[in-house]
Image: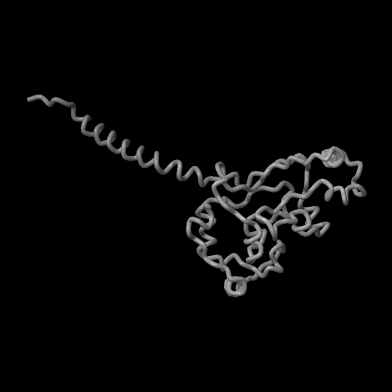
Amino acid sequence: MASVFPRWSNTAFRIAIAAVLLGGAAAVAAPMIYVRTDWNTGRNRPVQQPVQFDHRHHVQDDAIDCRFCHSTVERAGTAGMPSTTLCMGCHSQIWNQSPKLEVVRNSFYSNTPIAWNRVTDVPDFVYFNHAIHVNKGVGCVTCHGRVDQMPDVRKVSPMTMGWCLDCHRAPERHLRPPSAVVDMEWDAGPDAERIGRQVARELGVRRLVHCSACHR
């Protein structure tokens, strides 16, 4: 008696089943992988600004403290951006005719803030407070990287939920004395974890991993 289906149909059926199973797995895994890629998170992508502000010059050459420009980082949820008046405090005397600073001068004389482009951001449904992190010994470089070495600031941390939780589960590995929070070159060396545990005890750092810590 002749077969109803040709012999190759068994192989084709197996391939079809495998394709469906693999396709289903890929449909679930692909979005989970994509949201963690640099393409989606924007990591290591220099952000162009309306003014060519070089942190290397201002931090390394002029030794300007992070808090001089980001003045609310120790007492507010946001780090703050410098007003044009602050910029002109120096640049009314230094490079006061430079074409590169035309945007700054126009902003100052028109009393219109400069529209800086955000580099690092978290979703609106996430609560983040700079002051609590800085005052508990989390250094600027921990999240923002070596900004003092960047001609154009770029995002170096993915800012994903998993990345945040890695720190919240074991904050001791990322803590430093408050006096070293803005020190880009601070390195505890082999004593990092011991120092972190000591800072955690002194400042009362807790391992906050419950949902309401970040989602309020």
- Please count the marks in the image: 0
Task: Tell whether 33 sits left or right of 205.
Answer: left
Residue at 57%, 45% (x, y): give it.
124
Q: Looking at the picture, how far across and down is residue 64, in whole percent?
A: 80, 58
Q: Looking at the picture, how far across and down is residue 181, in whole percent?
A: 69, 64
Q: Quadrant of residue 167?
A: bottom right
Task: Tell whether 170 sits left or right of 132.
Answer: left
The colour scheme is: one colour
Residue nearest the viewer, comparing 206 with 173: 206
Give above or below for 2 relative to 214.
Answer: above
Give above or below for 104 relative to 216.
Answer: above
Residue at 27%, 36% (x, y): give it.
17
Q: Quadrant of residue 173?
A: bottom right
Q: Looking at the picture, how far across and down is residue 73, in whole percent?
A: 70, 57
Q: Quadrant of residue 108?
A: top right
Residue at 35%, 39% (x, y): give it.
24
Residue nearest the viewer, comparing 103 with 58: 103
Q: Furthest-left residue in view?
A: 1
Q: Looking at the picture, how far across and down is residue 161, in whole percent?
A: 51, 52
Quarter the N terminus occupies: top left
Give above or below for 14 relative to 142.
Answer: above
Task: Tell whether 192 sits left or right of 73.
Answer: left
Residue at 21%, 33% (x, y): give it.
10
Give above or below for 123 relative to 185.
Answer: above
